[in-house]
Image (tube, rainbow, N blue to C red):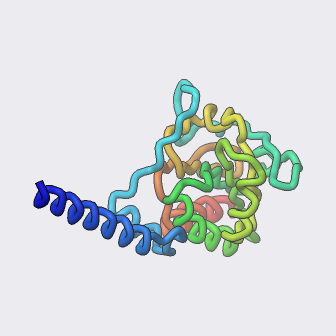
């Protein structure tokens, strides 16, 4: 009887040690790695529960309308950016892949904004109190829109995030990308659309 109790204590000690090691090694701040590394590792979009819509807009179709509030309380729409190439990007603060790709998207935006490119970052289902600290920490200089009731996500038939729709100067979807979007791919597609407009 004594031997079985000893083995029980040993097993409990091993479990406690394993838990302690896991807690000690946990890093709440994700490391900044290239988005391409996530793609190579088979990183899939984070599932998102939204009411079902008929279908996602396809390449060559008109982009569904967007009219949402920014973090500052202003209301802007996709139509406000007619004549510019716009990346409509669906994301959330709890989405790990979104955190990794935002710095890459930001670099392309900062480089090409003077040539006619903008990002509309549509946050899905969160409140301003949750989004603002994240946006500040990630230095997101482009408009961040709050899709609190997820109606816009529904109109785009979003099933997982990140999800991106590249819209041309005429409001037509030219690329649909679900999952992590790399800096290289985004720059290539945006530059092609900007060149066509010159």
x, y percentage for residue 92?
A: 61, 52
x, y percentage for residue 196?
A: 62, 60
- The quarter of the rendered structure image containing the N terminus is bottom left
| Picture layout, residue 60 above or below residue 188 | above
Looking at the image, which is closer to me, 4 or 27? 4
x, y percentage for residue 24?
A: 43, 74
* Residue beneath the point at 74% across and 40% down: 66
**How many marks do you count on the picture?**
0
Q: Is residue 165 left or right of residue 9?
A: right
Q: Is residue 33 left or right of residue 170?
A: left
Q: Quadrant of residue 108?
A: bottom right
Q: Quadrant of residue 37?
A: bottom left
* Residue beneath the point at 64% across and 54% down: 87
Looking at the image, which is closer to me, 71 or 122? 71
Q: Is residue 161 left or right of residue 12?
A: right
* Residue beneath the point at 62% across and 65% down: 195
x, y percentage for residue 73?
A: 88, 49
Looking at the image, which is closer to me, 100 or 164? 100
* Residue beneath the point at 56% across and 40% down: 60
- The quarter of the rendered structure image containing the C terminus is bottom right
């Amino acid at each position: 009887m004594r031997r079985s109790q000893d083995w029980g204590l040993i097993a409990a000690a091993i479990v406690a040690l394993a838990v302690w090691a896991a807690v000690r090694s946990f890093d709440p701040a994700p490391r900044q790695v290239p988005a391409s590394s996530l793609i190579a590792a088979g990183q899939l979009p984070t599932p998102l529960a939204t009411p079902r819509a008929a279908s996602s807009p396809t390449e060559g179709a008109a982009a569904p309308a967007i009219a949402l509030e920014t973090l500052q309380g202003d209301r802007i729409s996709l139509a406000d950016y007619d004549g510019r190439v716009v990346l409509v990007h669906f994301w959330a603060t709890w989405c790990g892949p979104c955190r990794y790709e935002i710095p890459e998207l930001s670099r392309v935006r900062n480089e090409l904004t003077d040539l006619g490119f903008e990002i509309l970052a549509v946050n899905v289902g969160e409140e301003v109190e949750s989004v603002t600290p994240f946006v500040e920490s990630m230095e997101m200089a482009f408009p961040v829109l709050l899709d609190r009731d997820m109606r816009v996500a529904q109109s785009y038939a979003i099933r997982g995030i990140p999800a991106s729709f590249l819209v041309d100067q005429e409001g037509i979807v030219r690329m649909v990308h679900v999952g992590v979007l790399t800096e290289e791919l985004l720059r290539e597609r945006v530059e092609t659309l900007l060149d066509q407009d010159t």
